[in-house]
Image: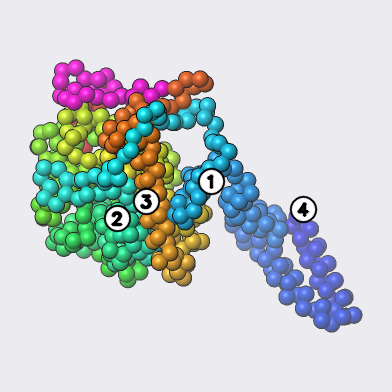
Amino acid sequence: MMRTVFYVVSVVALLAVWLIALAWPPFVWALVIVIPLILVGFYDIHWSDHNVLRNYPVIGHLRYAFEFISPEIRQYFVENNEDGKPYNRIHRNLVYARAAGTVDTQPFGTQRDIMEVGFTRGSHSLAPKEVSRDEARVTVGGPECKQPYSASRLNISAMSFGALSPTAIHALNAGAKRGNFAHNTGEGGLSPYHLAGGGDIIFQIGTGYFSCRTPEGTFDEDKFIEIANRDVVKMIEIKLSQGAKPAHGGVLPAAKVDAEIARIRGVPVGKDVISPPAHTTFSSPEGLLEWVARLREVSNGKPIGFKLCIGRRHEFMGIVKAMVKTKILPDFITVDGAEGGTGAAPLEFTDRLGVPINEGLSFAHSCLVGASLRDKLRVIASAKVVTGFHMVEKMALGADMCNMARPMLFALGCIQAVRCNTNTCPTGIATQDRQRAKAVDIDSRQVRVANFHDATVESFLDLVGAMGIESPDQLTPDLIYQRVADETERTYDEIYAFLKPGELLGKDINPAFAHHWAKASAEAF
């Protein structure tokens, strides 16, 4: 029906232009609009891949135009303050305010439904404490570490050059320098932009071994030694898996692999860069720990750790068993949650794999406690940390520090356009389009990154004091409550199973852990 209407309208339009032009010749210029529209409609009917356009030529394009701008329509006109995924307007506005150094207080009471199932809160004290600002830092480095690092309780999580633009990486690193905290390189290798600001670096080694790989894609120890022994590199992190796409290797399309990225990553120009899902340097928990020891040795004793998103619980317990057996311990473990992710990932992996951060963190912490290892290494929480309360929550569940990715991008000017995987980021942050990347003003944005970090840590320490304790190390899960049903709350101590020191090695094992501990092997994943 609409096809017939299109042909009739096209003929009528052409006749109308011709007749009007006879009386008024300049009207012939209307053909500049009419003819292209007719050609578009003719193409839609005969060759379009879209069923809608074949049935509704020309006007069907309105449907795709509105679909294209629908995220902006929802964000600007439909969302309320508690809507918006993955970060709501309340959290985004808080980051913007703290980054700009403006008022971050809230008038007229909470906007949250504090009786909603899932709502979490802390337990304050009638005898609040003054928390020393020295508690904003913690030392990372076990007995075998010769160069321990005094780290901020809050640092920039792993984000690679390639996923982020050169100016974004530069501004983040300069902000880390200004605020005296660390910047994780992500698995994409150590770029000049990670070094440009002079901020402390956590060098991440992924399964592709970028910046320290052979032409065949295996680990190159000599290249690693050159990087690891830079003064600015303070810690080394082995990435086993990540929350956004656990058990899946990263993919950088050929179009993004220009000469600069190829040089930094150690890969060919103009070819897809596909990281394997698993490491080739080791294939067992014992192999992992032996590699940890080797990296610590060749880096002259710098802190070495690994990052993972908890999946099969017995596999993490296998690593714990290997620690007990070999006596080799990492200096830190970063626990990522399934909520994490700054770049692109397959939908099914993002939505359906991985343990959420609170559950994964409490499990990892408890396993280490149960094996009497927890006091010998640091645990870092990484995923969906935005506010000082989130830091309190994670440390009550067992973390010593937190890493933050997407909120740091908000501090850079990210508007959550959710186009990170299209190379068309409107703010110039998640793109390799150099013209778009110029939108990130390094001088001003580094200040905002540092401001946001400092204000969040300040809020965190104030909350710790309000809870009646003098150090984040005294935070315990019984201080955090979650509403589980109408009129009913439970503490995190009740919700999550926690072990006592040595419990996993004894005869009586907590039933919540016994099955996984029985399956765990120190020899193989």
Is 501 covered by the magenta stretch?
A: yes
Q: What residue type is labelled 2?
A: Asn
- Tell me how far mark 3 sits from mark 4, CA to CA: 63 Å
Assign a secondary structure to mark 3.
helix
Q: What residue type is labelled 1?
A: Arg
Is 109 covered by the magenta stretch?
A: no
Give x and y (percent) for residue 94. 48, 47
Position of 465 with respect to 500 (left or right) is: right
Tag 2 or tag 3, which sits nearer the N-term? 2
**As drawn, 503 above or below 408:** above
Nearest the eye: 465 or 256:
465
CB atoms of marks 2 and 4 within 8 Å = no
The disc label shown at residue 522, or none:
none
- Tell me how far mark 4 sits from mark 1, CA to CA: 45 Å
Tag 4 or tag 3, which sits nearer the N-term? 4
Nearest the eye: 68 or 73:
73
Tag 1 or tag 4, which sits nearer the N-term? 4
Tag 1 or tag 2, which sits nearer the N-term? 1
Mark 4 highlights which residue?
1
Assign a secondary structure to mark 1.
helix
Q: Which amino acid does label 4 sit on?
A: Met
Instruction: Tell me what residue is drawn at x 81 percent, y 62 percent.
Output: 8
The disc label shown at residue 454, or none:
3
Mark 1 highlights which residue?
89
- Tell me how far mark 2 sits from mark 1, CA to CA: 28 Å
Instruction: Tell me what residue is drawn at x 31 percent, y 29 percent.
Output: 476
Position of 416 with respect to 150 (left or right) is: right
**As drawn, 124 above or below 301:** above
Q: Residue 163's image quarter?
A: bottom left
CB atoms of marks 4 and 1 within 8 Å = no
Direction bottom: furthest residue: 25
Mark 2 highlights which residue?
180
